């Protein structure tokens, strides 16, 4: 289990995390959601031990990471948001270097590299330079590199950002397959459908604070299972209802265009993270409200 206990982080006089508490169980797929600047990437870097907290502790299986030996810290690996591959290395060389950094035996390095690269469709490109790979394959290679040392936890910071729909689904399937093998993932994403599809639980963050932790389904139920988008006077107003009958009854009194649909995690994001902040899209203002 990963236990984040009263973590705060400051850079100079600016505090970016405020007493964050989280527990991630073994084998869980956990999501960190929030707007830019919410503190998600900082928290990921703290968990990976690339940064040290100003206050608080992070524990893995009861041991403090700040005081842990390298063998415990190596059980957590990271796939960064930015491409972090050397352009002068081949796919196999990237994997070989990773294995050496983690002091893996030569036989295990080679066997692990071949197994992982074949699983993600990269084996046929093993002798190609990384700069020749597509964005999707670069992301896959970064994931393979993180998996090679056989970690307990993999941190995914925006793992599908910039990928086309096909490459995104390839990554989703890879994450699902690995999760079914018992691997723990903690991911950040701005794609709410990604979090809703993949994650067991998600934490919404705003201005360095965790607003709550629930399953995607429980977040949606808290808001209302059905939504009505009402288009009037160049404004979109969204109202939420607990049952479809209530939503239909409400629409019978509307004189302008509307859309009746199921509520999703993006609605929760807007209501939770963006509450009180007008969201502009073209000439439209978005208003969020719930009908009792």
Image (spheres, rainbow, N blue to C red):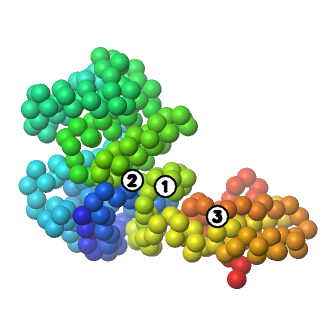
Q: CA distance from mark 1 to mark 2?
A: 8 Å
Q: Which residue is mark 1?
A: 195
Which disc is residue 210 wearing? none
Kind of element beneath mark 2: strand
Q: Residues within 10 Å of mark 2 (few under 14, many from 20)?
A: many
* Relative image position of residue 53 (x, y in whole percent): 23, 65
Alpha-carbon span between mark 1 and mark 3: 14 Å
Pinpoint residue 78: horizontal percent, then vertical percent: 29, 46
For label 2, the residue is 187
Quadrant (top left/top right/bottom left/bottom right) for the N terminus:
bottom left
Q: Position of residue 244 (x, y in %)?
A: 73, 70
Q: Earlier in the sequence, mark 1 or mark 2?
A: 2
Quarter where residue 124 is shown: top left
Q: Which residue is drawn at the image coordinates 53% and 69% (left, top)?
A: 219
Q: Quick check: marks 1 and 2 in contact, CB under 8 Å?
A: yes
Task: Please name the residue shown 40% across and 68% down the image.
Answer: 208
Q: Residue at x 51, y 53 (%)?
A: 197
What residue is disc 3 on?
Answer: 263
């Amino acid at each position: 289990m990963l236990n984040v206990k009263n973590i705060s982080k400051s850079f100079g006089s600016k505090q970016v995390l405020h007493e964050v508490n989280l527990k991630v169980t073994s084998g869980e797929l956990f999501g960190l959601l929030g707007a830019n600047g919410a503190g998600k990437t900082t928290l990921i870097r703290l968990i990976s031990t690339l940064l040290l907290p100003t206050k608080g502790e992070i524990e893995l299986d009861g041991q403090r990471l700040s005081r842990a030996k390298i063998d415990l810290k190596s059980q957590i690996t990271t796939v960064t948001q930015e491409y972090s591959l050397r352009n002068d290395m081949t796919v196999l060389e990237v994997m070989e270097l990773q294995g050496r950094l983690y002091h893996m035996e030569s036989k295990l390095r080679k066997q692990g590299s071949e197994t992982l690269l074949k699983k993600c469709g990269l084996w046929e490109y093993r002798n190609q330079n990384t700069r020749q790979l597509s964005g999707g394959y670069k992301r896959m290679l970064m994931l393979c590199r993180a998996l090679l040392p056989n970690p307990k936890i993999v941190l995914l910071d925006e793992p599908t950002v910039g990928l086309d729909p096909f490459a995104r689904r390839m990554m989703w399937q890879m994450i699902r397959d690995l999760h079914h093998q018992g691997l723990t993932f903690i991911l950040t994403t701005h794609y709410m459908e990604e979090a809703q599809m993949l994650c067991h639980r998600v934490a919404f963050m705003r201005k360095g604070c965790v607003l709550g932790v629930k399953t995607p389904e429980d977040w949606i139920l808290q808001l209302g299972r059905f939504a009505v988008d009402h288009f009037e006077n160049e404004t979109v107003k969204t109202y939420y209802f607990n049952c479809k009958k209530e939503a239909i009854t409400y629409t019978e009194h509307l004189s302008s265009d509307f859309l009746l649909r199921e509520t999703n995690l993006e609605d929760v994001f807007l209501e939770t993270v963006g509450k009180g902040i007008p969201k502009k899209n073209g000439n439209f203002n978005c208003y969020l409200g719930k009908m009792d």
